[in-house]
């Protein structure tokens, strides 16, 4: 019997069970992720297709497209997680925390279209994008 805790259902890995990946050997972890990727892709495609059907309500269309982008971003996050060297398990686990954060997933998806020249430029882009997700929006803060 394997003493490693496994998620209750591998297809439910998105139900806040992603942390179970840390307790799995790499091969089992990759198999669970590989099983979940087509599920995420199907979800993203279905949401995007639903957005294209709804031509009369722009707000509903944008919401569905946003959800589709978030589902696609989950795929990208998991692919980056798999690409992370095994010796960097702590940073990889921190990366998985963004899997459950809506704003971060949207920024992650948007970042795929950027062409930064280095990490500092990427950080600048992310910081600028993140400002739009603050509760106050693009509020400028200046000392009184």
Image (cartoon, grey):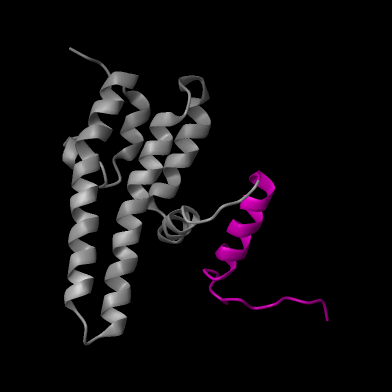
Asked whether residue 99 is in view, the answer is yes
Q: Quadrant of residue 11?
A: top left
- Residue 141 vs 109, above or below: the answer is below
Q: Position of residue 117 (x, y in %)?
A: 65, 47
* Left or right: where 114 falls relative to 52: right
Q: Quadrant of residue 141?
A: bottom right
Q: Position of residue 16 (x, y in %)?
A: 30, 46
| Residue in the image at 42% along x and 41% along y | 96
- Depth order, front residue of 67/121: 121
| Residue in the image at 52% along x and 25% along y | 88
Quarter containing the N terminus: top left
Q: Position of residue 32 (x, y in %)?
A: 24, 31
| Residue in the image at 19% along x and 66% along y | 49
Asked whether residue 5 is in view, the answer is no
- Residue 62 vs 115, above or below: the answer is below
* Left or right: where 112 falls relative to 16: right
- Depth order, front residue of 82/99: 82
| Residue in the image at 43% along x and 30% along y | 83
Q: Position of residue 56 (x, y in %)?
A: 21, 87
Q: Which residues are magenta?
A: 118-144
Q: Is residue 140 magenta?
A: yes
Quarter containing the C terminus: bottom right
- Depth order, front residue of 86/65: 65
């Amino acid at each position: 019997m394997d003493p490693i805790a496994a998620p209750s259902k591998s297809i439910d890995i998105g139900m806040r069970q992603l942390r179970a990946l840390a307790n799995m050997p790499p091969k089992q972890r990759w198999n669970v992720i590989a099983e979940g990727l087509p599920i995420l892709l199907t979800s993203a495609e279905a949401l995007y297709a639903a957005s294209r059907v709804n031509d009369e309500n722009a707000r509903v269309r944008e919401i569905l497209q946003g959800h589709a982008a978030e589902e696609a971003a989950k795929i990208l996050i998991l692919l980056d997680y798999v690409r992370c060297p095994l010796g960097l398990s702590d940073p990889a686990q921190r990366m998985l925390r963004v899997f459950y954060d809506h704003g971060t997933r949207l920024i992650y998806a948007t970042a795929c279209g950027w062409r930064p020249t280095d990490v500092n430029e990427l950080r600048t882009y992310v910081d600028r994008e993140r400002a739009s997700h603050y509760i106050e929006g693009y509020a400028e803060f200046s000392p009184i």
